[in-house]
Image: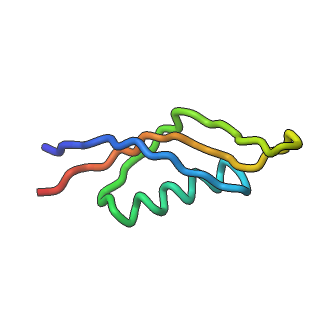
Amino acid sequence: MSVARITEIKSTSTKSFDDAIRTGLARANKKLQNMKSAWIENQEVMLDDEGNVAEYRVQMKVTFVLTD
């Protein structure tokens, strides 16, 4: 029997949502073992003073299996 845990993380990128997701998962993978899935719960953009996209943000839930 295995037991899984879910943790919530936020990640940002100045390039794209895809880059923010990949960066967040890569960072989480350094600390969490046995990552199995990620659910993108929310996406948002931060705008600069001129109304242009300055930053992409994602909020995701990462599932990982606990080990003994």
Q: How has the structure been colored for display?
A: rainbow
Looking at this view, name the residue that lies furthest to the front.
49
In the depicted view, which residue is nearer to us: 50 or 55?
Answer: 50
- Position of residue 16 relative to residue 3, above or below, is below
In the depicted view, which residue is nearer to us: 38 or 60?
Answer: 60
**Quadrant of res 45:** top right
Q: Residue at x 65, y 51 (%)?
A: 18
Q: Residue at x 46, y 62 (%)?
A: 27
Looking at this view, name the residue that lies furthest to the bottom.
30
- Left or right: 67 with respect to 23? left
- Position of residue 40 relative to residue 13, above or below, is above
Provide residue 19's location: percent of width, then percent of height: 64, 56
Provide residue 50's location: percent of width, then percent of height: 88, 43
Q: Quadrant of the C terminus?
A: bottom left
Disc tally is: 0
- Left or right: 21 with respect to 5? right
